Image (cartoon, rainbow, N blue to C red):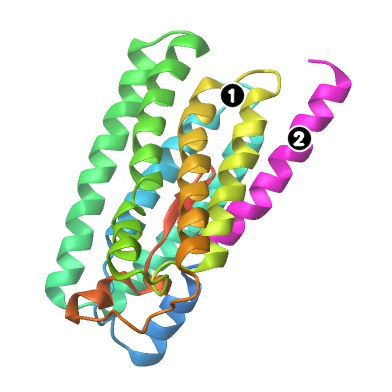
Amino acid sequence: MGGATAIARNVVGIIGNVISFGLFFSPAPTFFGIIKNKSVEEFKPDPYIATLLNCAFWVFYGLPFVHPHSILVLTINSVGLVFEFVYLTIFCIYASDKGRKKVLLFLFIEVIFFAAIVLITMLALHGTHRRSLVVGVLCDVFNVMMYVAPLTIMAKVIKTKSVKYMPFWLSLANFLNGVCWTTYALIHPFDIYVLISNGIGAISGLFQLMLYACYCSNKGEKDDDDGDRDLKPSGVQLSTLNGRSAV
């Protein structure tokens, strides 16, 4: 890897880390509110459960014996893993017994699934090429699922002609995050697995910004039924990268 190329890749990766950190931190106000109110109210743990598993796979992917030269992917997802663990811990503390059991059940399933993939990868697959292929495909599957998660909110925007439940800064951060990590993946050494999911994320973020431009003049006058509470901006997170949130 040439010196200039390596520097460019690292600079783009660091910028991606900063943006991804912001996305991981974005649900913090939600959990400050949960602590203050001593109740999880209508907020759902699902995005954080999914993001936790996503981060765990990207951390595994970024390890030298799986996919070398991915230290920036490894670092930001390690941070994300800690964030999601803290969020879920807070959720469990203030959730009902039913909600707490649901979280613990899904976490148990995730641990078993993740451990099985790690064992299969390390024992049955030899060489970083094969390991990168299997783990990279799994990472892309989970990342794409979370990148397309805003489709429900985008549909809501079109239906209500209101951007109340799609905050501009979160949409912008998602777009910039996708663009940044897509650029990172294109710089030598080329990384197809980072490219696929984040390319989709960049497109998704662009569509969100286009919708915002179309309906930004209406920020909530027309909507609101009881189901809207599940779409509160502070309660929605997209996964970042490999990198991503999410939020």
Q: Residues within 10 Å of mark 2 (few under 14, many from 20)?
A: some
Q: Position of residue 72 (x, y in %)?
A: 65, 38
Query: Magenta stretch containing residue 214, yes or no?
Result: no
- The foreground one among 113 and 11 is 11
Q: Quadrant of the C terminus?
A: bottom left
Q: Residue extending furthest right?
A: 4
Specify whether 128 is left or right of 18.
Answer: left
**From where the camera sits, is residue 242 visible?**
no
Badge 2 marks a residue whose secondary structure is helix
- Magenta residues span 1-24
Residue located at (61% from left, 37% from top) = 181
Residue located at (58% from left, 56% from top) = 173
Specify whether 187 is left or right of 172.
Answer: right
Specify whether 219 is left or right of 194.
Answer: left
What is the chief secondary structure element of the magenta stretch?
A: helix
Query: Magenta stretch containing residue 7, yes or no?
Result: yes
Tell whether label 2 touches label 1 (CB within 8 Å).
no
- The foreground one among 67 and 222 is 222
Residue located at (50% from left, 49% from top) = 205
Per the model, the C-alpha gap separating discs 1 and 2 is 16 Å
Q: Earlier in the sequence, mark 1 or mark 2?
A: 2
Query: Which residue corresponds to mark 1?
Result: 64
Closer to the observer: label 1 or label 2? 2
User: Mark 1 belongs to which amino acid?
Assistant: Pro
Query: Which residue corresponds to mark 2?
Result: 10
Residue located at (63% from left, 18% from top) = 190
- The foreground one among 184 and 110 is 184
Badge 1 marks a residue whose secondary structure is loop
- Relative to 183, does residue 51 appear above or below in the rendering? below
Q: Residue extending furthest bottom?
A: 37
